[in-house]
């Protein structure tokens, strides 16, 4: 099977060469995958608005010798309410950093996909983001097998996550209110 379709949320993107981009999505069928999006940085590209960060999209991909190549894409939801508020978008970037750092490539996990999608919706609508982000971190750690509810004490998720990643979180500096 050379061509395949998947639904996913864009969690990371990197400019590549003159007009290309490497995007990382968390998909329902394949988990975290990196995709080459050729020519999307050109002004005339019809695909570029559909591959913005945090967009939920349907992707048509072609699997060649290397990484999958994007052939077509359609947006399902772009979380525009979330993208209008700087604090909300920083919380969403934090969520994406955790998914990107903690989840392995090509590991299907529908529960994590649903958690990510629901968390982005919650960030869009909630006023208090601290509890939304904390609940996401706990549930993500639980789904990945790093945490079990053994006590009723509040866990310092920042320390647990940084110990697992063996590095400091990049979004930690811009989101001090989540780790007070």
Image (cartoon, helix red, strand yellow):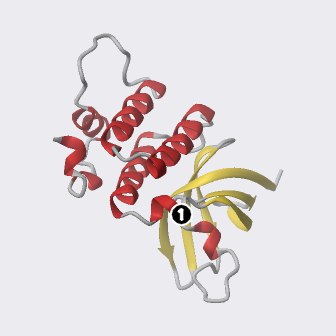
Residue under pointer 1: 80
Please indicate whether residue 34 sits to the left or right of residue 159 in the image. right
**Residue 52 percent across, percent down from the top left:** 55, 67
**Residue 167 percent across, percent down from the top left:** 25, 46
User: What residue sits 37% from the left and 35% below the top?
Assistant: 137
**Residue 34 percent across, percent down from the top left:** 57, 57
Please indicate whether residue 16 sits to the left or right of residue 72 in the image. left
User: What residue sits 42% from the left and 53% below the top?
Assistant: 92
Say above or below: 18 vs 21: below
The residue lying furthest to the left in this view is: 180
The residue closer to the viewer here, 90 or 31, is 90
Say above or below: 13 vs 133: below
Please indicate whether residue 23 sits to the left or right of residue 50 in the image. left
Q: Secondary structure at mark 1?
A: helix
Say above or below: 135 vs 82: above
Task: Tell me the quarter of the image containing the C terminus.
Answer: top left
User: What residue sits 19% from the left and 50% below the top?
Assistant: 176
The residue lying furthest to the right in this view is: 1
The residue closer to the viewer here, 74 or 162, is 74
């Amino acid at each position: 099977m050379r061509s395949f379709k998947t639904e996913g949320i864009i969690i990371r993107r990197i400019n590549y060469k003159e007009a290309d981009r490497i995007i990382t999505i968390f998909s329902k069928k394949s988990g975290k995958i990196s995709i080459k999006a050729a020519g999307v940085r050109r002004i005339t590209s019809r695909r570029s608005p559909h591959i913005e960060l945090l967009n939920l999209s349907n992707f048509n991909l072609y699997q060649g010798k290397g990484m999958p190549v994007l052939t077509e894409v359609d947006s399902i939801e772009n979380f525009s309410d979330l993208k209008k508020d700087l604090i909300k978008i920083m919380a969403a970037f934090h969520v994406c950093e955790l998914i990107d750092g903690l989840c392995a490539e090509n590991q299907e996990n529908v529960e994590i996909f649903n958690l990510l999608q629901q968390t982005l919706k919650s960030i869009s609508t909630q006023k208090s983001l601290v509890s939304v982000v904390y609940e996401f971190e706990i549930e993500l750690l639980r789904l990945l097998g790093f945490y079990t509810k053994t006590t009723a004490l509040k866990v310092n998720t920042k320390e647990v996550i940084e110990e697992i990643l063996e590095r400091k979180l990049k979004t930690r500096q811009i989101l001090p209110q989540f780790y007070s």
